[in-house]
Image: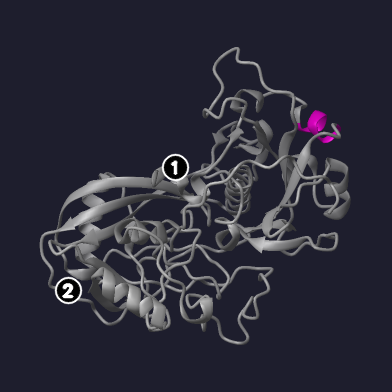
Amino acid sequence: MFASDLPLSRTVTDRAADRRGDEGLLTALIDDDSTRVLLVSGGRVVTRHRGRRRTLALYSPQEAALRAPTGSLEDRWAFLGYDDADQVPGAAPGEPRPDGPAYLAHHVPEDGTAALPPGHVWTALREVGSELSARDAGLATAAVALYEWHVRHPRCPRCGEATLPVQGGWVRRCPADGSDHYPRTDPAVIMAVVDDEDRLLLASSTAWPEHRFSTLAGFVEPGESVEHAIRREVREESAVVVGDVEYRGSQPWPFPASLMLGFRAKALTTDITVDGDELRAARWFDRDTLRAEVAAGTVALPPGTSIARALIEDWFGGELPAGPAGGDRWSAGTAPADAPGAAGTPAPAPAPAPTTAAAAPTSRRRRDRAPADEPRVDEPRVDEPTADATPAAEPTGPRPGGRRQRRRAATPPTDATPPPDSATP
């Protein structure tokens, strides 16, 4: 059940791709009071509490437009789909859809404002993803991925002309040459490397506090298989040679556009070498040692929304104990006092993400940006190398000194899909 339970992989939404080409679809859904809308800005969505659980705050289209009055219809709205009647992904030709609400995303610029009701707050998806229901997690993940793509790809990579959103927000069309451009997804591998003694390899980046450890990860390069990428990345980062690999599951990580492919990898060697520049340390852990150090707070593991945690606990055989006093030792001490979001408030504009490491300083990569207080353990994601003639809102380019970003982790919850939220708290 590992693969299906990853927090951001869970969804019960029919994306209804066949409806995206309908002219007037967005206008008709915005005029329909039964449509439900979530607000998204950067990697954040608006949530509220239902009892002890956090859920998406869903609004009527009219309320969403009033609370966050931004931009044109095409620029700020995207069609996410419907509730899936049979819980099987996709809809067969001619399959009837249930009588239920359609879901839209309303994009709010990161420098924009939204008048939220009491109890409704902007929440980082990377932090809340494991708490959300399958419906909410699927909707939020799709909305964040689309938002990030629209912000980073405003122009045609062929001629530099500003493109226009079409197909319900899932395509950008160039008015100059008529070309269509689609959301990108970058494959990345993340590995639980285990040796003959059933010990797990974890590493700590020089960009993190000393107590942070996570699994190794990296991008799949052009013309490369995932198996080759796993073996190359592990050797580059730790000098450990890997043999057999076993697929465990995948999870989208829309910060901005990665798909994390999770594996268990068998180590053929155990000697570790790190460069001390990007990786501070890498260690083999047996289960007793890891349990004791996590409980004592000397080791902090990635939090619950990313796949790294799921890979670690899959090897461990269950949930690991919380750190001292149940605190989030992963987040402790990650941001300087003047960094965006350092006090726990989501930053309105992204700042450079901390770099993570690999042993080989050659093959450099470019990274996306993120609030400085958000760890990037499980994100070997790179900013998009488009050929825009005019710079996009957020600059791209090589980052000196860093080569990769690693991914964090995921605690796999399962839950039932709640009924649609009302437009008010």
Q: Residues within 10 Å of mark 2 (few under 14, many from 20)?
A: some
Instruction: Check residue 174 for magenta coloring.
Output: no
- Can residue 154 be seen here? The reply is no
Residue located 10% across and 65% down the image: 269
What amino acid type is highlighted by mark number 2? Answer: Ile
Instruction: Check residue 29 for magenta coloring.
Output: yes
**Horizontal and vertical percent position of residue 165:** 67, 39
Q: Which mark is residue 272?
A: 2
Residue under numbered circle 1:
4
Q: Determine whether, in the image, residue 22 is placed left or right of residue 322.
A: right
For the residue pair 242 and 107, the one nearer the viewer reads as 242
Q: Main secondary structure of the magenta part?
A: helix
Q: Which mark is residue 180?
A: none
For the residue pair 194 and 376, the one nearer the viewer reads as 194
Q: Residues within 10 Å of mark 1 (few under 14, many from 20)?
A: some
For the residue pair 34 and 421, the one nearer the viewer reads as 421
- Residue 372 sits above or below residue 158 on the image: below
Residue located 75% across and 28% down the image: 25
Q: Which residues are magenta?
A: 26-31
**Horizontal and vertical percent position of residue 58:** 76, 47
For the residue pair 31 and 83, the one nearer the viewer reads as 83
- Can residue 320 be seen here? The reply is yes
Give the structural element (helix, strand or loop) at label 1. Answer: helix
